[in-house]
């Protein structure tokens, strides 16, 4: 493979070094903030093949991308995912990561580590089994905890929990979630709910809980010291004097991270999405299928698409949904 070239720079001078790739829109959970209860999933021919995902990952690497995160839906329900991890892991990236709900980790964590996965982000919104099932609609908390513990045992470079905090739903569990992360020596990020897709379970204005509110809860028990830690994503990290675990905050509403955004996303349908909170995109699947042996048109399309990346997103907390796609289509 040719030496990576720094080619992906948007019109605001931001260099794109990080790509999140959705490998499936399917999931074994139905989290209330992510998708509707009765989802209609894409037919197979509309979804990128694993070979196409591997090809696009290689092209991005050749264009200077240093980090790739595989997402879903739930990436571990995609047949052949471990082989894809192995293929992408051979591209010489600085970091290969995955976001997962943890349900498949009890029997897949060690295989993923062996295949070359560096980091895992594991979603965990509640430590109450009944509440967990209510939020996920189908999830088994004990199975996810076994998955987290198996991942810790496997020895990944980094493991982080992701918790979406919703007022009057799970905000009372913030300190319990911190304690859980501390007990296992792993990190945790608290995420403001993003207004993506029309949902029926709740209105987002009634459940919105800001990162500042979550931080105030944590500081009732622990001193939080700003950290210079950076995993290439949007989390802003703090450390605690008596623990190796870091606390992160992802704040798309209250402290947006647009100014230094280094990320683009590839949806499960092969759309290059330039911003999570925007519909600007370019169809790469069509190009890949039109030019199965020639990477140059795809490379040129990716470079030119950087001019579509907006300066910032505009999310609201009043229930106004401007982005109709669900999170499972986007890739986190």
Image: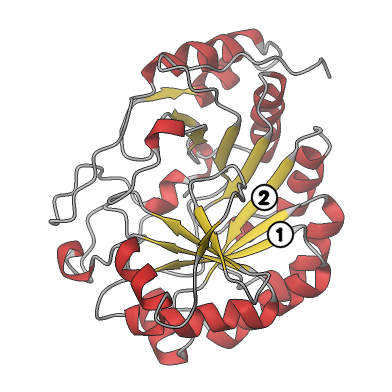
Query: Based on the displayed image, in which of its 4 quarters is residue 227 positioned?
Result: bottom right
The answer to whether residue 165 of the structure is visible from this angle is no
For the residues labelled 1 and 2, say whether their Cβ atoms are less than 8 Å apart.
yes
Residue 178 relative to residue 55: left or right: left
Give residue 299's mark.
none
Helix or strand or loop: what does disc 2 sit on? strand
The correct choice, above or below, for 82 with respect to 221 in the image is above
What residue is drawn where x is 47% and y is 90%?
129
The answer to which of 5 and 282 lies nearer the viewer is 5
Graded by Cα atoms within 10 Å as few (under 14), some (14 to 19) or many (20 or more), the crowding at tag 1 reads: some
Q: Which residue is mark 2?
A: 97
The answer to which of 126 and 36 lies nearer the viewer is 126
Q: Residue furthest right?
A: 114
What residue is drawn where x is 67% and y is 40%?
50
Helix or strand or loop: what does disc 1 sit on? strand
What residue is drawn where x is 64% and y is 77%?
242
CA gap between label 1 and label 2 equals 9 Å
Q: x%, y% of residue 141?
A: 54, 84
The answer to whether residue 316 of the structure is visible from this angle is yes
The correct choice, above or below, for 282 with respect to 43 in the image is above
Number of numbered discs present?
Answer: 2
Q: Which residue is mark 1?
A: 158
């Amino acid at each position: 493979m040719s030496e990576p070239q720094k080619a992906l720079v948007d019109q605001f001078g931001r260099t794109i070094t990080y790509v999140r790739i959705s490998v499936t829109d399917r999931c074994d959970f139905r989290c209330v903030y992510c998708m509707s209860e009765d989802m209609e999933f894409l037919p197979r021919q509309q979804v990128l093949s694993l070979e196409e995902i591997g090809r696009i990952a290689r092209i991005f690497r050749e264009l200077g991308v240093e980090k790739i995160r595989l997402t879903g839906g739930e990436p571990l329900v995609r047949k052949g995912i471990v082989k894809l991890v192995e293929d992408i892991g051979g591209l010489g990236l600085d970091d290969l990561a995955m976001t997962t709900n943890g349900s498949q980790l009890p029997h897949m964590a060690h295989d993923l580590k062996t295949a070359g996965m560096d980091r895992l982000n594991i979603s965990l919104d509640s430590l109450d089994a009944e509440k967990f099932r209510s939020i996920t609609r189908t999830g088994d908390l004990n199975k996810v905890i076994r998955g987290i513990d198996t991942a810790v045992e496997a020895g990944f470079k980094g493991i982080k929990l992701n918790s979406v905090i919703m007022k009057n739903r799970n905000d009372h569990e913030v300190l319990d979630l911190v304690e859980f992360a501390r007990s296992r020596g792993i990190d945790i990020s608290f995420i403001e709910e993003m207004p993506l897709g029309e949902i029926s379970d709740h209105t987002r204005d009634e459940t919105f809980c800001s990162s500042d509110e979550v931080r105030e809860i944590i500081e009732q028990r622990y001193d939080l010291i700003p950290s210079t830690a950076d995993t290439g994503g949007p989390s802003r990290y703090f450390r605690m004097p008596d623990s190796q675990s870091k606390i992160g905050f992802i704040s798309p509403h209250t402290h947006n991270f647009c100014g230094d955004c280094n990320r683009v996303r590839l949806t499960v349908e092969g759309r290059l999405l330039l911003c999570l909170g925007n519909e600007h995109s370019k169809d790469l699947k069509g190009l890949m299928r039109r030019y199965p042996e020639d990477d140059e048109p795809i490379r040129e399309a990716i470079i030119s698409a950087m001019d579509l990346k907006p300066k910032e997103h505009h999310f609201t907390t009043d229930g106004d949904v401007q982005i109709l796609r669900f999170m499972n289509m986007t890739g986190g």
